[in-house]
Image: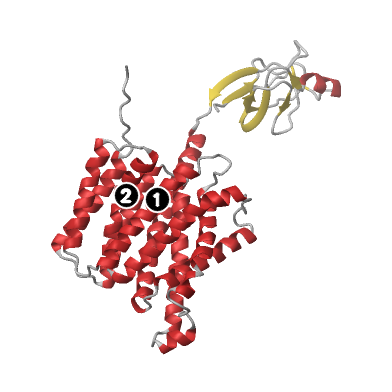
Amino acid sequence: MKITAFTLCPTIPLHKTCRPSSSALNRYSRFDTVHLFAFSSRPNEFPESTNDGCSSSSLPRHSWLLYSSTTFKFRPRTSLPIILSSDSDTPRFELRATAVPESASDSNVSSSSLFKTLELGFLFGLWFLFNIYFNIYNKQVLKVYPYPITVTVAQFAVGTVLVLCMWGFNLYKKPKVSGSQLAAILPLAVVHTLGNLFTNVSLGKVAVSFTHTIKAMEPFFSVLLSAIFLGEMPTLWVVGSIVPVVGGVALASATEASFNWVGFWSAMASNLTNQSRNVLSKKIMVNKEQSMDNITLFSIITVMSFLLLAPFIAFTEGVKFTPEYLKSAGLNIRQVYTRSLLAALSYHAYQQVAYMILERVSPVSHSVGNCVKRVVVIVSSVIFFKTPVSPINSLGTAIALAGVFLYSRVKRIKPKQKTG
């Protein structure tokens, strides 16, 4: 809002100084069209006048802020007697307008924009950092404890405790979920459970860098499933961006030192189930009554995934997470438990941060960030685990990631509407 400052000063010599009566004050204290507030003052000396025996006086010059209103009060900052001239009972003032600079409001806007930029950069940093910690701790656990179902259940169990605490302590609003909503979310929970399980199977069999190279093929499955189930046909730009993704993954797989078919197909299955979850979200959660924010949906899916997968431990891997079993297997009990807990906390932390970022940026920007995140995870895991990587393998990984980045950019290009 532009503000105008006004300076009031007498236009004629002032002769007589007197204190007005209460009626005079009431008469002159209200105006019908302006509201004046004093914000600064500077003394201004006037010539002496001795025509009628009054002593000389000085009148401070005041500046006033002018606002539009219906009823206004004249409020100077300091008490000042009203000066009446000998000619008239009415005080005379000259109203001068000066512009007040808007630098203050501009400064507030720029500082707010800077704060939001720093906040977003901080969230992206947390997203990448929690991803690195999750993959490193998870790989360390699966390396010595080859039971991916138990590890996955433990991660869902920690997530369930976090969600219940979040709701119990009102850190996030507890949702009111109907039976129809739970029925709609159930398929999402099933594919979410399978996606995390297959990822852990792959991480237990092959290097972290190779698992994430294969998972770079997620755009391929996204395009395929969207075309089959949603009828969303890809543009030529999208198809063209998928080619380097597939070619890069094939080149990296052919030269991978830790290649394992179980690890390879588990990572592929993880791509399929994770992208199925996205497609199902679009196909099922279309009713406004069933829709909910991403964090609430992820929290409910986490609890349901724990309830779905926990019973399968007894029929598959058995109860092999007790201290007695770990001790008999020659494992460091404290180390396994600590790393499993840190992996689970990091997993849910990066998921929550990812949804917080998605609320602040567009899906395309989020996809670009996800691509950068995968590069960071691959590079950090290669350095930490000292994974042997050949030049051709590195080239294949780079080509695949470049294709993912290109896909995230061309996805925004809309096909031209046919007219006529």
In the picture, the quarter occupied by the N terminus is top right
What amino acid is labelled 1 in the image? Answer: Ser
- Left or right of 60: which side holds 392? left
Report x, y in % for residue 158: 51, 68
In the image, is 76 to the left or to the right of 252?
right
Residue 235 position in % (x across, y down): 28, 36
Q: Provide residue 194's location: percent of width, then percent of height.
A: 41, 60
Image quarter in which the C terminus is found: top left
Q: Closer to the camera, 15 or 75?
A: 75
Which label sits on residue 221? 2
Specify whether residue 252 is in view: yes
Q: Dot 1, how many residues are within 10 Å of its Cα: few (below 14), some (14-19), or many (20+)?
A: many
- Between 398 and 59, the residue placed more toward the observer is 398
Q: Position of residue 349 (x, y in %)?
A: 47, 61
Q: Amino acid at mark 2?
A: Phe
**Which structural element holds mark 1?**
helix
Q: Classify mark 2: residues with Cα within 10 Å, few (<14), some (14-19) or many (20+).
A: some
**Residue pictured at 51% horizontal, 56% vertical:** 301
Earlier sequence position, callout 2 versus callout 1 = 2
Q: Are marks 2 and 1 in contact (CB under 8 Å)?
A: yes
For image coordinates 33% across by 32% down, the residue present is 414
The dot on residue 276 is: 1
